Amino acid sequence: MADFDLPTALGLPAVLPPLRMPSTSELAGLARGSALLGQALALSAWADGRKVYEDSDFDEFDGSLSDSLDQVWYLAHAVGFVEVDEDSNLATLGPSAEPWRSGDDEAVLELWDEAYTHLVIESMAIESGEELDLEGVGGATMTALFMARSAGLALAEFTAMARAAALEQNMPERWTAYVDAHGDPAQVLLKRLHALGAVEFDDDTARMTPLGATIMRDQMCDGGFTIPPLPEVADMTAADLVAATAALTPDQLRADTAAWLALRTPADAASELLAAAVDATGRVFAATTIADIDVDTATTWQPALATPELRPYAQQALTRPHEPADRAWLLVDALAVTTDPDDPAAIAAELAKAADGDETALFEHVWRLPHPDAAAALTLIGDRHPEKKTAKAARKAAFKAASRR
């Protein structure tokens, strides 16, 4: 039997943007601070030497819990903090209790990994029982959260993804009835993972913590993905810095960029950035970064006129008139990289800036471009532009671009 191919199963590219990972000792320190695992160990220690039954309600346990006692008990079992003899029902501390308390970093991270996996795969199903089939929902939603990286996901978007995954196995009314009776299981999962230390919140947005993202990255790499580690700034090439645009928050990227620029002369930095500008992300990043550093514009950009992909940016930097094809190229790059695809006003503004008064005429140049994102850009305009006539013209041009490719 062939090995399972996770990237194909998820419909994702096999190579994903890099991830900056803390050191093993830093990760273990974060793991040891897990409130939820601390509670699971405390409950296990309390149960040690007591008889525990399926319907035990742990009323005598005195502990401040962020989750239901049943879920904490299941977690304690899953990671081996506690064991219960099948014949006597006597609970004893399990084999993982001491490694968690005093084990090395690798042992602690392995136990935290087991806890994370249990919560994502099992805890929603445990809670819903036979009322709602939630198998696979945790894995699907956490993959989406990992893919969102530093941008995170709005809480409402996370719930919508969980509902969509659940409806593959349930009738809509079952989801609605369960939510009405018990609350939103997706938000319960997020809070549970927050208590574990895998998720953090910022207003109405959730994102993975460095610990959660690192463990998730390891699991995805085991499934067939390639997710390279992001080097420290001193070891970063210009290509690494471009790749970091998908891996870091805007503040982190600004800090890394400033530190990277400080390690080289402005002229060398510009040369390296232009050499790494091999796609839309690289071109936009290079152009915006070079614009903020002290270089001789003519010396920097004149050679780039000979490179078709960089020519529009060189024309712009040298304040030369743009041909329609140059403006079309800049539009496609901008829509591919900097424009929110869910913001029709931003898309319309980007098109208006590039079109110079005649938007439909510009589409004729866009669909002819040898740009890999031309059809996607036209499709985006066709789907999102607020003016129907413009949107229709973009859809026609998108069909021509797709046919040409």
Image (cartoon, rainbow, N blue to C red):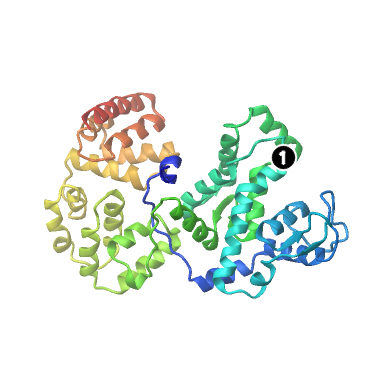
Q: Residue at x 36, y 70 (%)?
A: 233
Instruction: Name the residue rendered at 68%, 66% in the picture.
Output: 95
Is 304 left, or right, of 255 in this rendering? left
Could you say where residue 159 lies in the image, as x and y percent from the top left? 60, 41
- Identity of the residue furthest to the front in this view: 87
Image x and y of residue 248, in percent: 43, 59
> Closer to the camera, 91 or 182?
91
In which quarter of the view is residue 156 placed? top right
| Residue at far right of view | 60
Quadrant position of residue 30: bottom right
Q: Which of 139 and 298 is in front in this view?
A: 139
Residue 122 visible at all: yes
How many dots with numbers?
Answer: 1
Residue 264: percent from left, percent from top:
26, 73
Measured along the vertical axis of the image, is residue 172 above or below residue 299? above
Check the picture and name the quadrant holding the C terminus.
Answer: top left
- Describe residue 277's horizontal placement relative to residue 65 as left or right: left
Quarter occupied by residue 304: bottom left
Residue with the mark numbered 1: 129
Note whether residue 259 is visible.
Answer: no
Three-letter amino acid code of the residue under disc 1:
Gly
Quarter of the rendering occupied by the N terminus: top left
Q: Can you say whether 367 is above or below 240 in the image? A: above
Q: Which of 154 and 188 is in front in this view?
A: 188
Judged from the image, the secondary structure of the residue bearing numbered disc 1 is: loop
Residue 327, position as x, y percentages in the image:
23, 41
In the image, is residue 220 above or below residue 111?
above
Q: Residue at x 66, y 53 (%)?
A: 191
Q: Are there few (<14), some (14-19), or many (20+) residues within 10 Å of tag 1? A: few
